[in-house]
């Protein structure tokens, strides 16, 4: 759901209840500014966070595995998303 900040403020109770079942995007001047979501969804997203590894922490085996990795053709459409940023 996408709402203006004014609408979110006017309907705070309804909007926060809605955020329990779906993310509510709050806009300002027509641009996405904030997203309100349930605490459970936030925790789920945090759990999916990946650990950061510095390049100098990689073993030779890690580097070889990365070099040998191929992206499946089914993900080729993501290249367009990256080039549009």
Image (tube, rainbow, N blue to C red):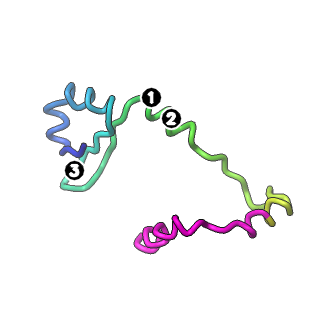
What residue lies at 81% left-to-right and 66% top-to-bottom? 64
8 over 53 or under it: above or below: above
Of labels 3 and 2, earlier in sequence is 3
Q: In whole angstroms, how far apart are the C-alphas of marks 1 and 3?
A: 26 Å
> Number of marks in the image?
3
Where is residue 35 drawn, in percent x and y? 33, 42
Q: CA distance from mark 1 to mark 2?
A: 6 Å
Q: State the residue at coordinates (27%, 29%).
A: 16
**Disc 1: which residue:** 40
Residue 77 within the segment the image draws in magenta:
yes
Question: Mark 3 falls on what kind of element?
Answer: strand
Neighbours of disc 3 within 10 Å: few (<14), some (14-19), many (20+): few
Q: Which residue is mark 2?
A: 44
Percent position of residue 28, x then y: 21, 50
Q: Is residue 78 left or right of residue 67?
A: left
Front label number (3 vs 2):
2
Residue 56 spot, x, y in % from top left: 79, 60
Residue at image x 25%, y 44%?
26
Q: Main secondary structure of the magenta part?
A: helix
Residue visible at 78% across and 63% down in the picture: 65
Secondary structure beneath disc 2? Answer: helix
| Badge 2 density bin: few <14, some 14–19, many ≥20, Cα 10 Å | few
Q: Which quadrant does the N terminus fall into?
A: top left
Residues rendered magenta in the picture: 65-85
Foreground: disc 1 or disc 3 = 1
> Which residue is disc 3 drawn over?
28
Tell me the element at label 1: helix
In the rendering, at what x and y percent does residue 7 appear? 14, 39
């Amino acid at each position: 759901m996408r709402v203006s900040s004014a609408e979110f403020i006017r309907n705070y109770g309804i909007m926060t209840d809605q955020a329990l079942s779906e993310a509510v995007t709050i806009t300002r001047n027509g641009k996405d500014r904030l997203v309100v979501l349930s605490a459970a969804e936030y925790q789920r997203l945090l759990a999916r966070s990946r650990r950061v590894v510095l390049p100098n922490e990689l073993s030779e085996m890690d580097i070889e595995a990365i070099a040998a990795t191929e992206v499946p053709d089914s993900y080729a459409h993501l290249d367009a998303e990256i080039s549009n940023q």
